[in-house]
C-alpha cells in the first residue's frame, strides 16, 4: 500500500474553489473540475514517493494490480455549471464501436471519436455537497403534465415532446418540429406559473440551462429527464444506456475505467445522434437513486456490476475494515491512517493504492474515506 497523487483536470464547468479547498491549497484561478485516482492513461495518478505514473508502474507490475489495469477509476468531481447530457455504452457496444472506429482509421483523440477505448462505463456519484443532476427518463405521466402546461401557455414547438421517447429524442436533437422555437420560449418562460411542483421544477431546470446554453436542443431534452437534488451522502447509479447530466455540486464518482461518452446536448463537443440513440436505454426510470447497505460506520454502495463497489467510511478513532486489494482509498474529511502491513497517513483530498493481495485492516483517526474495490464473489 502506498500514497498516490494527481493534479486537477481543468474543464470550463469546474469549480474554482472546491478541489483547492479540499486539498488545503490556494485556488489556482482555473476551473478545476476533476481529480482522478486510478491508472487510466488519459490522466494517470502518480506514486507519491517517486512521481512515476501508476499506469507505467502497473505495466511493469501487473500482478500488483491484479491485472493489466485497474478495473475502476475514482474521482472527486466539482461542478459549478452543467456538464453535457450523455450516456455510456454497454461492454459489447464499446468493443464493437472501438473496433469499428479503429478500422475506419479515426484517431483515438479525434474530436469526432465516439469510442476511445473498448470498455463500458457504469458509474455512481455520491454527493459530498448538495448535488443536482438529471438522470434517466421521466415516467410518462410526468412528461404529459409538463407538455400540458406548456400547451396551456401556447408555448411553440411541443410536438416533439409528444412523440414516443426514442422518436422524441431524435426529433429534438435533430431540431425538428419547432425545437428551436421551444428552446427560445423556455429561455424566457416563467416557471412560477406552474402549480404542479414537478412541472415547476422541470421548468426551473430548463430555464437555467438556457442561460448556460442558449439555443441548445439539450434545454428541451431536459424536460424528458428526471431531476434529482441529492443531499450529502446520497447517490445515483448510472448504468449503461442511462441518459444523465450533472448540473452542480461536489461528489465522489466511481466508474469502470473508461472514457467512452456519447453526448446528447448542452455541449459544443461532438454529438452523434444515431450512435446515441443506439446506446440509450429508453426505459422510464422512477427512482435513479442507489441506497447503501449500512453496517455501523461503513456504508456500502453495490451497483451490481463486476467492476466495483464503494465503501463510504466514517472514522472516529478506529474502524476495522477488511478490504482485499486492489483498492483505492480517498480521504474527503479529516486525517486518517490506513493500516495494513504498512501505515499510510492521508489528509483530505489524498489517496492510497491497496495492492492486489494486500488486506486493508484498519482506518484510524477522525474523518471520512471512500474506498473503491472489486465486489467479493
Image (cartoon, grey):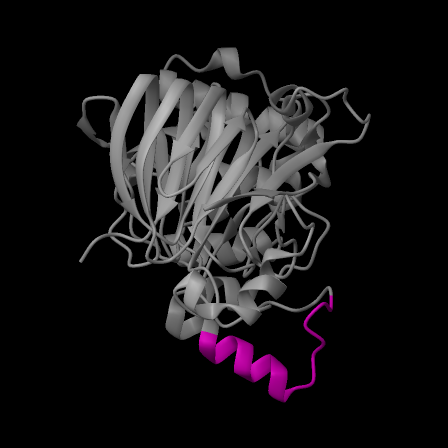
Q: Residue furthest bottom?
A: 103
As drawn, 19 above or below 259: above
Q: Is residue 244 left or right of residue 49?
A: left
Which residue lies at the image location 56% right of the left edge and 70% below the top edge? 59
**Observer-nearest of 349 and 98:** 349
Q: Where does residue 100 sit, x and y in percent of width and height?
A: 55, 83
- Inspect this view and state whether residue 140 appears: yes
Q: Which residue lies furthest to the front in this view?
A: 341
Which residue lies at the image location 73% right of the left edge and 64% below the top edge? 111
As drawn, 59 above or below 138: below
Q: Where does residue 273 sit, x and y in percent of width and height?
A: 56, 63
Which residue lies at the image location 53% right of the left edge and 56% below the top edge? 171
Q: In this view, does 376 lie to the left or right of 265?
A: left
Which residue lies at the image location 47% right of the left edge and 63% below the top edge? 277
**Observer-nearest of 220 and 147:** 220
As drawn, 73 above or below 195: below
Which quadrant would residue 24 be assigned to in this image? Answer: top right
Q: Within the magenta stretch, is there residue 145? A: no
- Inspect this view and state whether residue 244 appears: no
Q: Within the magenta stretch, is there residue 100? A: yes
Which quadrant would residue 21 be assigned to in this image? Answer: top right
Q: Is residue 366 left or right of residue 322?
A: right
The boundaries of the magenta stretch are 95-110
As drawn, 172 above or below 277: above
The quarter of the rendered structure image containing the C terminus is bottom left
**Observer-nearest of 43 and 24:** 24
Which quadrant would residue 320 be assigned to in this image? Answer: top left
Q: In this view, does 290 lie to the left or right of 244?
A: left
Amino acid at each position: 500500500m502506498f500514497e498516490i497523487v494527481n493534479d486537477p483536470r481543468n474543464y470550463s464547468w469546474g469549480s474554482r474553489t472546491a478541489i483547492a479547498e479540499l486539498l488545503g491549497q490556494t485556488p489556482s484561478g482555473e476551473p478545476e473540475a476533476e481529480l482522478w485516482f486510478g491508472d487510466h492513461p488519459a490522466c494517470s495518478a502518480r506514486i507519491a514517493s517517486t512521481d512515476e505514473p501508476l499506469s507505467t508502474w502497473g505495466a511493469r507490475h501487473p500482478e500488483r494490480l491484479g491485472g493489466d489495469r485497474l478495473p475502476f477509476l475514482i474521482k472527486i468531481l466539482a461542478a459549478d455549471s452543467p456538464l453535457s447530457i450523455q450516456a455510456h455504452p454497454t461492454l459489447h457496444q464499446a468493443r464493437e464501436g472501438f473496433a469499428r472506429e479503429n478500422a475506419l482509421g479515426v484517431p483515438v483523440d479525434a474530436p469526432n471519436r465516439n469510442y476511445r477505448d473498448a470498455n463500458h462505463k457504469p458509474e455512481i456519484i455520491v454527493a459530498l455537497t448538495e448535488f443536482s443532476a438529471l438522470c434517466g427518463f421521466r415516467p410518462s405521466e410526468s412528461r404529459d403534465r409538463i407538455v400540458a402546461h406548456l400547451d396551456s401557455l401556447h408555448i411553440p414547438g411541443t410536438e416533439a415532446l409528444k412523440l414516443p421517447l426514442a422518436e422524441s429524442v431524435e426529433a429534438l436533437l435533430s431540431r425538428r418540429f419547432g425545437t428551436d422555437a421551444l428552446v427560445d420560449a423556455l429561455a424566457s418562460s416563467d416557471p412560477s406559473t406552474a402549480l404542479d411542483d414537478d412541472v415547476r421544477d422541470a421548468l426551473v431546470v430548463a430555464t437555467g440551462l438556457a442561460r448556460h446554453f442558449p439555443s441548445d436542443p439539450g434545454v428541451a431534452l431536459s424536460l424528458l429527464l428526471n431531476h434529482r437534488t441529492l443531499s450529502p451522502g446520497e447517490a445515483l447509479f448510472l448504468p449503461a444506456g442511462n441518459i444523465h447530466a450533472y448540473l452542480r455540486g461536489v461528489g465522489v464518482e466511481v466508474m469502470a475505467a473508461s472514457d467512452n461518452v456519447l453526448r446528447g446536448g448542452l455541449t459544443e463537443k461532438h454529438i452523434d445522434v444515431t450512435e446515441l440513440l443506439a446506446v440509450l436505454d429508453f426505459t422510464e426510470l422512477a427512482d435513479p437513486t442507489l441506497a447503501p447497505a449500512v453496517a455501523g460506520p461503513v456504508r456500502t454502495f453495490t451497483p451490481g456490476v463486476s467492476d466495483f463497489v464503494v465503501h463510504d467510511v466514517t472514522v472516529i478513532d478506529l474502524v476495522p475494515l477488511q478490504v482485499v486489494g486492489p483498492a483505492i482509498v480517498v480521504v474527503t474529511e479529516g486525517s486518517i491512517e490506513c493500516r495494513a502491513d504498512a501505515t499510510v497517513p492521508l489528509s483530505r483530498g489524498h489517496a492510497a493504492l491497496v495492492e492486489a493481495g494486500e488486506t486493508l485492516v484498519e482506518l484510524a483517526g477522525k474523518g471520512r474515506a471512500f474506498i473503491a474495490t472489486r465486489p467479493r464473489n
